[in-house]
Amino acid sequence: MNFKINWDGLGIITSLACAIHCAVLPLLISSLPLFGINIIHNAAFEWGMIALAFSVGCYSLYHGYIKHHRSAVPVSLFAVGFVFLIAKQFFHEHEYALLPPAVAFIVYAHYYNFRLCSRSKCSTPGHKH
């Protein structure tokens, strides 16, 4: 059985999970602190999500760049998104203004990387990566 992970898809999912955590979760489960559970504005959890998104993104984009397309555009988009994401961590009063562009740039970087990888000649079925 030949199982292959779509790293761009995983990157999009982790970026969207981060956005949901930051934007929707506070509205839905603001009562969790009553039970001693606090993942809203939990620094360790947020930095962990950022590290996960960064790790998946770097691997995915590096793989796409080296093996498929040699385009710096997805890496540039990803870097811009991460500047917004890190800025959100330090400028909490602007969190909701910085989060949408962060997620948009990161998700689009993965989407663009996926498109470039799909178009490359070495992405044909049966090709060993």
Image (spheres, rainbow, N blue to C red):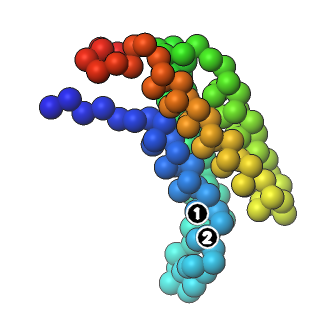
**Of residues 102 and 34, the one drawn nearer to the viewer in this rendering:** 102
Q: Is residue 82 visible?
A: yes
Q: Residue at x 66, y 49 (%)?
A: 103
Q: Quadrant of residue 20?
A: bottom right
Q: Nearer the viewer, residue 112 or 18?
A: 112
Residue that carries the numbered disc 2 in the rendered image: 24
Describe residue 122's horizontal placement relative to residue 2 as left or right: right
Element type at mark 2: loop
User: Viewed as shown, does residue 129 lie left or right of 58?
Assistant: left
For the C terminus, give its image quadrant: top left
Query: In the image, is residue 66 above or below residue 74?
Result: above
Which quadrant would residue 75 be assigned to in this image?
top right
- Which residue occupies 48% across, 36% down? 8
**Relative to 23, residue 29 above or below:** below
Q: Circle 1 sits on which residue?
A: 21
Question: What amino acid type is highlighted by mark number 1?
Answer: His
